[in-house]
Amino acid sequence: MQVGVANTTSAFKTLEEERQGREEAVDAQLQVFPAMLPIWLKQLSTLDDPRQAKKIKHKLAVVLLFGLLRFVFQMSSRRQANAQMTQPN
């Protein structure tokens, strides 16, 4: 049996409804992240860092967490993430 994407139309009637739905989904995710952040950082801190010690500017745990969050929020690059995080609301 092959499982795939359902062949249905969107439950949203308008683009505005879809935007609102996406915002609500992100808000729900952001409620979880503050509780999970210390746990993730602690777990990531246990990994060995293969980089050259004298050239390290950022801790490996922070770099990995940043990459993970970029993936979760579908940001294609560090520059895109920086641009979106630093722009005024």
Image (spheres, rainbow, N blue to C red):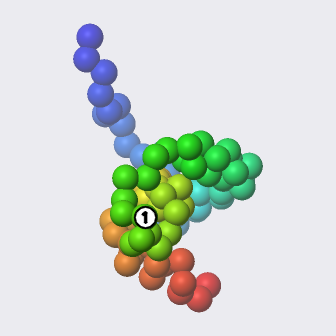
Callout 1 amino acid:
Ala
Is residue 17 positioned above or below 11 on the image? below
Closer to the camera, 39 or 46? 46
User: Pointer 1: residues within 10 angstroms few (<14), some, or many (20+)?
Assistant: few
Residues 81 and 61: in front is: 61
Q: Residue furthest top?
A: 1
Question: In the orientation shown, which residue stands out farthest toward the left?
Answer: 2
Direction from residue 74 to residue 38 in the image, left or right: right
- Report x, y in % for residue 55: 39, 72
Q: Is residue 9 left or right of residue 12?
A: left
66, above or below 8, in the image: below
SS type, badge 1: helix
Q: Residue at x 29, y 28 (%)?
A: 4
Instruction: State the count of labels.
Output: 1
Instruction: Tell me where residue 52 appears, x and y as whole percent.
Output: 36, 63
Q: Quadrant of the C terminus?
A: bottom right
Q: Residue furthest front?
A: 54
Up/down of 27 relative to 54, above or below: above
Residue at the spot of label 1: 53
Left or right relative to 3: residue 20: right
Q: Residue at x 37, y 59 (%)?
A: 51
The quadrant of the image that shows the N terminus is: top left
Residue 28 visible somewhere in the drawing = no
Tell me which residue sits at (42%, 71%) in the image.
54
Question: Could you say where residue 47 lies in the image, as x and y percent from the top left?
Answer: 49, 44
Looking at this view, is 50 or 83 the one in front?
A: 50
Residue 85, image x, y percentages:
53, 77
Whether residue 39 is visible to the viewer of this picture, yes or no, is yes
